[in-house]
Image (cartoon, rainbow, N blue to C red):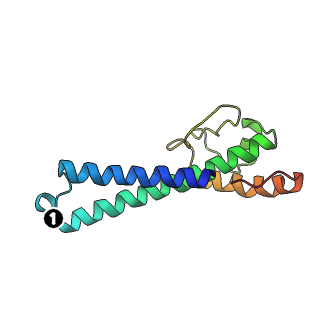
Amino acid sequence: MSTKTKLTIISILTYCAFIILALSLGFLSPAKIGITWTIFWYVAAAGIIYYLWFKNLVFQRVMYYSKALKLAQTDLAKMLPNLKESQVVPDPGKPAIIAPIFNFPLQGLDILSAKLTPMAKEKGIQPFR
């Protein structure tokens, strides 16, 4: 099973769990908060789940290519132009199940992905699945 499929299944199950929890506890009931806010929170939850799905997908791609290219955390940090002191670059040597949510932005992962994908293609590394 590909990483994208696994992350998609996890995201769908997470959203379903949110819906079941919201319906069973009634905290998003239109009678309590109104139909507009109910719709807003269901759509907002779907947006958050989609963002986390996408960020984790890009994170897994970056980690896959950086491990295959035998790059260290310092090598990845050198590839990022405007790295802030508060941003911690993910370490390919340490196992990480999910992407860093607060201390490393999606923009940094996109930059790394754009730089690592052609490097991996040149070295003949299998594409990320």
Q: In the image, 74: left or right of 49?
A: right
Q: Please name the amino acid that badge 1 sits on.
A: Gly
Query: Which residue is painted at 15% across and 64% down in the image?
Result: 34
Q: In the image, 86: left or right of 92?
A: left
Residue 76 position in % (x across, y down): 73, 43
Residue 110 position in % (x across, y down): 65, 56
Residue 78: tell me if it is visible: no
Query: Which residue is painted at 42% across and 55% down in the image?
Result: 48
Query: Which residue is painted at 65% across and 45% down in the image?
Result: 83
Residue 128: tell me if it is visible: yes
- Looking at this rendering, what residue extends furthest in the top direction? 94
- Looking at this rendering, what residue extends furthest in the bottom direction? 36
In terms of image quadrants, where is residue 111? Answer: bottom right
Q: How many marks?
A: 1
- Compared with residue 104, is residue 73 higher up or lower down, i.e. above or below? above
Residue toward you, 107 or 127:
127
Query: Which residue is painted at 82% across and 43% down in the image?
Result: 69
- Looking at this rendering, what residue extends furthest in the left direction? 31
Location of the C terminus by quadrant is bottom right
Q: Secondary structure at mark 1?
A: loop
Q: Which residue is mark 1?
A: 34
